[in-house]
Image (spheres, grey):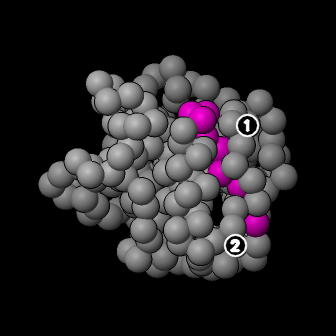
Amino acid sequence: MGVRLHKAGAASGVGRWVGDDAPPPYWAFWWAGGLALAQHLQANPALVAGRRILDLGAGSGLVGIVAARAGAARVTASEVDAHGRAAIALNAALNGVTLAGIESDVMDWPPPVDLVLAGDLFYAPDVAARAMVFLDACVAAGIEVLVGDPGRSPLPLDRVTLLARYTVAETGAPRPASVFAYRR
């Protein structure tokens, strides 16, 4: 993939951020939906070239970084975790890209973007419900939405259209993950 990220591992030092007894944070790992979206953007750079992008629930910043490298005009990353936002900034610098902004919670407003990229946002019913309200507002405002997900149960299958399937190596053995167009 060619993207370098600060990730959790025995020698990563991520424990200094969250406490040595705490589990490594979610944003310090590869996630299947984000990996699928990143692969999809690398295979189809015209999807983001020259466009304003929001990487929603950005985690490590992987998807936004790939969008920036593929020629997006502007990439804003949104991540609720403060340490995750710091990691996004470090990861963007590590990959030689600049993100227009790294915001906390943006799910209360339709953003001034052309495309929302949402990787791994359907992992829990409460998060999925909140994400759907925001994504519905984006689609109603004419904003295109792509979702990356490995098929978790909260994914609203009645609101997505399959675009591509990928085999990705999340945190262990390779597994399937897909990219979907989201619709209202």
Name above or below for residue 66 compared with residue 11. Answer: below
Q: Position of residue 112 (x, y in %)?
A: 84, 52
Q: Residue at x 57, y 53 (%)?
A: 88
Q: Is residue 163 visible?
A: no
Q: Position of residue 72 (x, y in %)?
A: 69, 72
Report the front residue among 13 and 112.
Answer: 13
Quadrant housing residue 27: top left
Within-10-Å neighbours for mark 1: few <14, some 14–19, many 20+: some
Segment tinted magenta in the rendering: 74-82
Give the residue at mark 1: 106
Q: CA distance from mark 1 to mark 2?
A: 20 Å
Check if residue 57 falls in the magenta segment.
no
- Amino acid type of the residue that numbered disc 2 sits on in the rendered structure: Ala
- Amino acid type of the residue that numbered disc 1 sits on in the rendered structure: Val
- The mark that comes first in sequence, 1 or 2, is 2
Report the front residue among 72 and 180.
Answer: 72
Give the residue at mark 2: 72
Question: Judging from the image, what secondary structure is the residue with disc 2 in?
Answer: loop
